[in-house]
Amino acid sequence: MGKHYMLNLYGCPFELLNNELFLRQIITEASIACKANLIDIMSKQFHPHGVTVLALLSESHISIHTWPEKGEAAVDVYTCGNARPELACGYLSDKLQATKSWMGSTER
């Protein structure tokens, strides 16, 4: 059916994790990097900090939830077809300057 990647990022700078516009931009770029087709993107800035971004793809979705006060983010990428979700994960990890990460995946 598809490929599902879960990515936990640690040691990311507060300023990046709490920047809603930056996160929307890199999710958009990650969808391009993994050869997916972005349909729409929505986001929510939480107070005092934290952001959730969800990208709807023709192939499924990419989401990110951030905890800037901890330097952590959780990423979920699910795709079907020819998209390469592992490329989105690598791209997001690099852009968020993670010092440590964990990635799990399933393919069906």
Image (cartoon, rainbow, N blue to C red):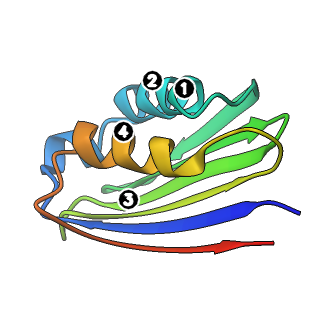
Q: Are marks 2 and 1 in contact (CB under 8 Å)?
A: yes
Which residue is at the front of the view, 22 or 48? 22
Which of discs 2 and 3 lies nearer the camera? The answer is: 2
In the rendered image, which residue does mark 4 sit on? 91
Looking at the rendered structure, the secondary structure element under dot 2 is helix
At x 69%, y 31%, the residue is: 36
In the rendered view, would you say 71 is above or below 80?
below
Residue 1 at what x, y percent from top left?
A: 89, 63
In the rendered image, which residue does mark 3 sit on? 66
Image quadrant assignment for residue 40: top right
In the rendered image, which residue does mark 1 sit on? 28
Q: Amino acid at mark 2?
A: Gln
Which of discs 1 and 3 lies nearer the camera? The answer is: 1
The answer to whether 105 appears left or right of 36 in the picture is left
At x 18%, y 55%, the residue is: 98
Q: How dense is the environment of label 3, judged by Cα within 10 Å: few (below 14), some, or many (20 and up)? A: many
Marks 4 and 1, how far apart in space? Answer: 11 Å
Q: Amino acid at mark 4?
A: Tyr
Q: Are marks 1 and 3 in contact (CB under 8 Å)?
A: no
Q: How dense is the environment of label 1, judged by Cα within 10 Å: few (below 14), some, or many (20 and up)? A: many
At x 75%, y 25%, the residue is: 37
Marks 1 and 3, how far apart in space? Answer: 16 Å
Which residue is at the front of the view, 15 or 48? 15
Q: Amino acid at mark 3?
A: Thr
